[in-house]
């Protein structure tokens, strides 16, 4: 009887072959499409990339920092090393010596007048202008002291190599590495959530597809029975009341089929939305084409301690606790000295390395910089105590999460046990309902069982089949929930 009813349902299913012309989707293909379409998963992927880049950025703090700076400045006035009086004195430095030299020339002329034979020797001295020569020398000295600092060019190239930063750089590197691991774990959690949502939508479609088949099979039975009752009424072996009772059930069956069809359409839309398909896509799933639902997976064996430790949420909280412990080290580094080696090359124009020159000159330099904190009025101590409190909060949160996850795993395990027992009971009820329907149908055809009893047997058969489908889907989903609680959903 069961195989016959499913054959009828499959025949009805393929009446419209155009709806199933496309390739049926498997559960794995739906998962892949959902993971490719899910926005939260894409966000988690980007966070994972960002965490990796931050880890690389933190590692660069171990290497020397290099920098280059350039400057150009124009000033309205230049710096003067001589005041105005000094410049004037240098420009007229030949006045006094010139006057003295003029007196000497007068005496020389008297000597020449007294001794004409010396004229040829002393005459050249008469033409010398010592005043102008000394003034020119003084002006040259004044010009040499000009700085011409109205246009200044400068550049520096520096490097700083940290030697000891109080453990701050090491702590930051560990924090970014922990953050990278947390981002990876959060990506895994997001992926498990996508898989869970997809599986729920997938099996909801399968459940409603099978219930629609049942509704179609039930409707076919009632239509056949309605025809038989009409013939029996015509032959006088059934009453019109029997015919009306069957027709009422027939109307209810048509309404049930409509509801099942609407529910199936909505479930397909939800699955299409998760997979990134158009909502009107008439997708077909592999498992809805099968005569029977796939067998329920065996309950997985697990060790509670390993299961709790293996959960991504627990690992993330452990890493968060490690991050907060490193923050304590960072707060402690505020009390420790820091040491760094610095060096570089600086150049300027004008330069001061060879007097005051209008040319580019530079020099190398290297040194050690040490900083020792002395007093910050207790601010560092308060920060360190606050960091320790955050670390303790992380430890308490981790312990609480372990307890809740253990409770969640136990609840999922107990629920799966109940679902498996319910599945066994539903299968027995279905077998009894099928046997009862077989006897009722034969008795009705032989005229020894009234139509009302046959209708009751058909209704009980529909209910038993529906409950069996629900029990199968529930067992599948509870198995999925247990695997999610164990953190093995992607295995």
Image (tube, grey):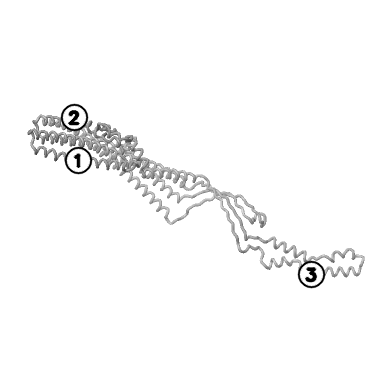
Secondary structure under tag 3 reads: helix
For the N terminus, the image quarter is top left
User: Which sits in the foreground, 468 or 214?
Assistant: 214
Q: Where, by quadrant of the figure, is residue 307 drawn? A: top left
Kindly report the distance in space between the C-alpha atoms of the residues bearing marks 1 and 3: 135 Å
Secondary structure under tag 1 reads: helix
Residue count near mark 1 (Cα–Cα under 10 Å), binned few <14, some 14–19, many ≥20: some
Residue 425 appearing in the image: yes
In this figure, which residue is indicated by the disc labeled 2? 1
N-terminal label among 2 and 1: 2
N-terminal label among 3 and 2: 2
Q: Is residue 332 left or right of residue 125?
A: left
Residue 99 badge:
3
Q: Is residue 442 left or right of residue 329?
A: left
Which mark is in front, 1 or 3? 1
Among all residues in the image, which is located at the extreme front? 234
Relative to residue 350, is residue 206 depicted above or below? above
Kindly report the distance in space between the C-alpha atoms of the residues bearing marks 2 and 1: 21 Å
Q: Is residue 478 left or right of residue 372?
A: left
Q: Return the x and y of residue 57 as percentages of the image width and height.
A: 47, 45
Q: Return the x and y of residue 383 as percentages of the image width and height.
A: 40, 52
Which mark is in front, 3 or 2? 2
Q: Return the x and y of residue 264 as percentages of the image width and height.
A: 26, 40
Q: Residue at x 51, y 48 (%)?
A: 339
The number of numbered discs placed on residues in the rendered structure image is 3
């Amino acid at each position: 009887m069961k195989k016959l009813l499913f054959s009828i349902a499959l025949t009805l299913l393929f009446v419209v072959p155009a709806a199933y012309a496309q390739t049926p989707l498997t559960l794995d293909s739906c998962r892949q499409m959902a993971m490719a379409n899910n926005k939260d998963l894409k966000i988690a992927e980007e966070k994972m990339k960002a965490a990796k880049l931050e880890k690389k950025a933190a590692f660069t703090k171990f290497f020397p920092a290099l920098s280059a700076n350039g400057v150009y400045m124009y000033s309205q006035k230049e710096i003067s090393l001589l005041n105005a009086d000094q410049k004037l004195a240098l420009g007229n430095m030949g006045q006094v010596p010139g006057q003295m030299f003029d007196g000497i020339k007068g005496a020389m002329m008297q000597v020449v007048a007294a001794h004409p034979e010396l004229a040829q020797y002393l005459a050249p001295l008469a033409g010398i202008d010592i005043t102008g020569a000394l003034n020119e020398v003084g002006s040259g000295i004044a010009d040499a002291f000009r700085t011409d600092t109205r246009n200044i060019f400068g550049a520096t190239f520096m490097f700083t190599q940290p030697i000891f930063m109080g453990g701050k750089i090491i702590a930051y590197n560990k924090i970014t590495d922990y953050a990278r691991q947390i981002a990876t774990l959060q990506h895994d959690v997001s992926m498990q959530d996508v898989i869970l949502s997809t599986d729920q939508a997938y099996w909801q479609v399968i459940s409603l597809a099978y219930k629609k088949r049942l509704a179609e099979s039930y409707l076919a039975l009632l239509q056949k029975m309605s025809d038989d009752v009409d013939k029996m009424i015509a032959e006088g072996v059934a009453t019109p009341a029997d015919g009306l009772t069957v027709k009422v059930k027939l109307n209810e069956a048509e309404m049930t089929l409509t509801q099942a069809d609407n529910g199936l359409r909505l479930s397909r839309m939800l699955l299409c939305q998760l997979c990134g398909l158009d909502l009107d896509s008439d997708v077909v799933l592999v498992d809805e084409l099968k005569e029977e639902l796939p067998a329920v997976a065996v309950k997985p064996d697990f060790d509670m301690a390993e299961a709790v430790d293996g959960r991504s949420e627990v690992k993330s909280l452990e890493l968060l606790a490690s991050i907060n412990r490193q923050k304590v080290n960072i707060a402690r580094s505020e009390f420790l000295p820091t040491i760094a080696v610095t060096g570089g090359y600086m150049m300027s124009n004008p330069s001061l390395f060879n007097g005051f020159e209008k040319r580019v000159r530079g020099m190398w330099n290297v040194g050690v910089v040490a900083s020792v904190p002395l007093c910050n009025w207790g601010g560092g101590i308060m920060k360190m105590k606050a960091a320790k409190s955050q670390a303790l909060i992380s430890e308490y949160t981790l312990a609480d999460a372990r307890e809740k996850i253990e409770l969640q795993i136990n609840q999922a395990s107990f629920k799966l046990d109940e679902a498996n027992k319910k599945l066994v009971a539903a299968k027995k009820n279905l077998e009894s309902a099928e046997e009862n329907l077989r006897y009722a149908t034969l008795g009705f055809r032989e005229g020894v069982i009234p139509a009302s009893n046959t209708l009751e047997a058909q209704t009980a058969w529909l209910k038993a089949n529906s409950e069996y489908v629900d029990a199968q889907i529930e067992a599948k989903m509870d198995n999925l929930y247990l695997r999610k609680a164990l953190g093995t959903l992607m295995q």
